Image: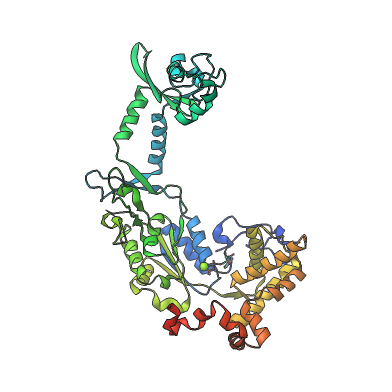
């Protein structure tokens, strides 16, 4: 894949000579172009997006697997289906599924708006309607919201009927108080009248709607009646949703959905109807998007369900807790047509459910991500692009000077040698390199420096080291540090000591 970052003549790259600071580096708008050094994985991710194939990314942490999965999701067309659960009056414990396209959802919103009628200012309503709805004072004619039963203008009860009931010798003292204790609104909720239109008499309903009045004519009233006849429903996977769903470490219920418990067992008056307690799982939320599972083998037996969901492209939602009132509820055929992207380390491969792997193989691609890239001018330029991206994405640190970037490149070279034993290469274990950039950025920010400079990088390299390395330096070796730590006098008083050192082989830990 080529990434055209513009500016420089060289394709996809900006040589270090061309820039003063990383501010001069243009960030690619294509999310997959922001991934550096993983050309094969990116190529396959593009195919996976356009052909709807699955993807397995294998390799060490911090090399861009999650980033690729997310970028892939951003390459998909927007979801076009909304998933809803509809109350089933014949059998409430078997709610039905309803799918709506975006055009249908839009049309529905429109006609719902129509069924709400037209809004008018109370002053535009007929005087007697405004009075009966409680907007207009029948004594002085001033307008005020119906929640005030006393007219703010003349202080009298707005409506004649209320006035007579509150005509009390202590009204002046009690006035405000009575308003509160009675909690009474002026007027009525709705007033039905008739009007003549095109020579025909038709019913018009005026309704209170906060500070305005809603007017429903015959057509709007009919629409409303239609909606009231419809079974109630609930949107469980909305049209506007994130096409990237992370299911790492998910439980059964998070992955597959659930039906919440109802202490009243769905009693028609007291309880919540079963359809209303249905919750979508990650597999359903990922419908038309990407379901991403990092550390795939950690899902254990749940992998089987993912396999079924991938095969069927639909998966029922039922109450997963056998003790719960939700257990008897089931919604069949809930769609879950997702692109599966899994990620794991090389050593975890054998723990992936083998039918799941062959499924990915059969309908997708497996790719081993790179840990290093050759140290060429083009790849150096990509690393510069990476530095600029990390800074811009962080948003809290200043740009880096050319000299600072050069040091980061040197560090990338060093890490390729130390970690992966590769000469003339640059590391692609970029999460940690990103950490170095942020640490240097924090130092620069701390002293209000304009840019991240070489010295900030050097200082950050001293402080932003993994704690294992710090232990090595202080105690000679990591294991040495471990034994020293245990033999310190503080060990027995530490609240965690017992758990850390005894619990696993000693039952007393649970006492
Ligand atoms: N190949 C890459 N290109 C650009 N940035 C990367 C790359 N790999 C890692 N990063 C940076 O490191 C961060 C962590 O990477 P991530 O995608 O979570 O790695 P993984 O999933 O392989 O553990 C990313 O958000 C990104 O900022
Ligand atoms: Mg990750």
Q: Is residue 69 left or right of residue 409?
A: left
Front in this rendered view, residue 265 or 481: 265
Quarter of image, res 53? bottom left
Front in this rendered view, residue 404 or 192: 192
Q: Residue furthest left?
A: 90
Q: Is residue 6 above or below residue 346?
A: above
- Ligand 1, image quadrant it occupies: bottom right
Point out the image quarter for the C terminus.
Answer: bottom left
Q: Is residue 400 above or below residue 178?
A: below
Q: Residue furthest top?
A: 199
Q: Position of residue 473 (x, y in %)?
A: 68, 84
> What colouring style does the render use?
rainbow
Q: Is residue 174 above or below residue 102?
A: above
Quarter of image, res 314? bottom left
Residue depicted at x 32% and y 61%: 321
Q: Position of residue 115 (x, y in %)?
A: 38, 30
Front in this rendered view, residue 214 or 201: 214
Look at the image and tell me whether residue 383 can be seen: yes
Q: Position of residue 63 (x, y in %)?
A: 55, 70
Q: Position of residue 477 (x, y in %)?
A: 63, 88
Residue depicted at x 35% and y 22%: 218
Q: Is residue 482 left or right of residue 189?
A: right
The number of numbered discs placed on residues in the rendered structure image is 0
Front in this rendered view, residue 289 or 180: 180
Look at the image and tell me whether residue 422 can be seen: no
Point out the image quarter for the N terminus.
Answer: bottom right
Residue depicted at x 42% and y 72%: 298
Q: Residue furthest front?
A: 169
């Amino acid at each position: 894949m080529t990434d055209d970052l513009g500016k420089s003549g060289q394709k996809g790259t900006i040589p270090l000579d061309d820039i003063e600071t990383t501010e001069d580096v243009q960030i690619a708008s294509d999310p997959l172009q922001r991934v550096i050094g993983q050309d094969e994985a990116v190529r396959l991710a593009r195919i996976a997006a356009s052909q709807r194939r699955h993807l397995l990314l294998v390799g060490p942490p911090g090399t861009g697997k999650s980033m690729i999965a997310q970028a892939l999701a951003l390459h998909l067309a927007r979801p076009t289906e909304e998933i809803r659960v509809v109350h089933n009056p014949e059998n409430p414990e078997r709610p039905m599924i309803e799918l709506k396209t975006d055009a249908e959802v839009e049309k529905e919103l429109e006609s719902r708006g129509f069924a709400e009628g037209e809004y008018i200012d109370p002053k535009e309503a007929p005087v007697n309607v405004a009075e009966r709805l409680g907007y207009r004072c029948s004594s002085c004619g001033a307008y005020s919201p119906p929640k005030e039963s006393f007219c703010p203008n003349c202080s009298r009860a707005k409506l004649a009927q209320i006035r007579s009931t509150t005509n009390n010798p202590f009204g002046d003292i009690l006035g405000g108080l009575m308003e509160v204790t009675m909690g009474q609104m002026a007027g009525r909720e709705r007033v039905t009248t008739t009007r003549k239109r095109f020579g025909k008499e038709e019913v018009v309903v005026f309704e209170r709607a906060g500070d305005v009045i809603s007017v429903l004519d015959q057509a709007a009233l009919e629409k409303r009646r239609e909606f009231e006849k419809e079974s109630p429903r609930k949107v469980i996977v909305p049209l506007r949703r994130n096409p990237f769903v992370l299911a790492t470490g998910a439980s059964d219920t998070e992955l597959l959905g659930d039906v919440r418990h109802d202490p009243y067992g769905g009693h028609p008056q007291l309880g919540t109807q079963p359809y209303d307690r249905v919750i979508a799982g990650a597999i359903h939320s990922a419908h038309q998007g990407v379901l991403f599972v990092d550390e795939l083998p950690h899902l254990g037996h749940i992998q089987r369900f993912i396999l079924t969901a991938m095969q069927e492209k639909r998966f029922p939602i039922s109450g997963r807790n056998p003790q719960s009132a939700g257990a008897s509820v089931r919604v069949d055929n809930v769609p879950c047509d997702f692109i599966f992207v899994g990620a794991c380390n090389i050593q975890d491969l054998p723990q992936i459910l083998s039918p799941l792997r062959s499924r990915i193989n059969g309908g997708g691609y497996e790719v081993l991500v790179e840990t290093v890239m050759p140290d060429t001018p083009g790849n150096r330029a990509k690393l510069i692009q990476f530095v600029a991206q990390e800074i811009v994405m962080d948003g809290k640190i200043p740009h880096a000077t050319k000299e600072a970037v050069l040091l980061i490149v040197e560090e990338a070279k060093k890490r390729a040698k130390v970690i992966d034993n590769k000469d003339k290469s640059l590391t692609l274990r970029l999460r940690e390199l990103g950490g170095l950039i942020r640490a240097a950025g924090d130092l620069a920010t701390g002293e209000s420096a304009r840019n991240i400079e070489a010295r900030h990088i050097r200082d950050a390299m001293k402080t932003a080291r993994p704690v294992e390395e710090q232990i090595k330096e202080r105690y000679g070796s990591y294991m040495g540090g471990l034994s020293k730590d245990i033999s310190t006098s503080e060990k027995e008083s530490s609240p965690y000591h017992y758990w850390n050192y005894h619990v696993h082989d000693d039952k007393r830990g649970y006492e």
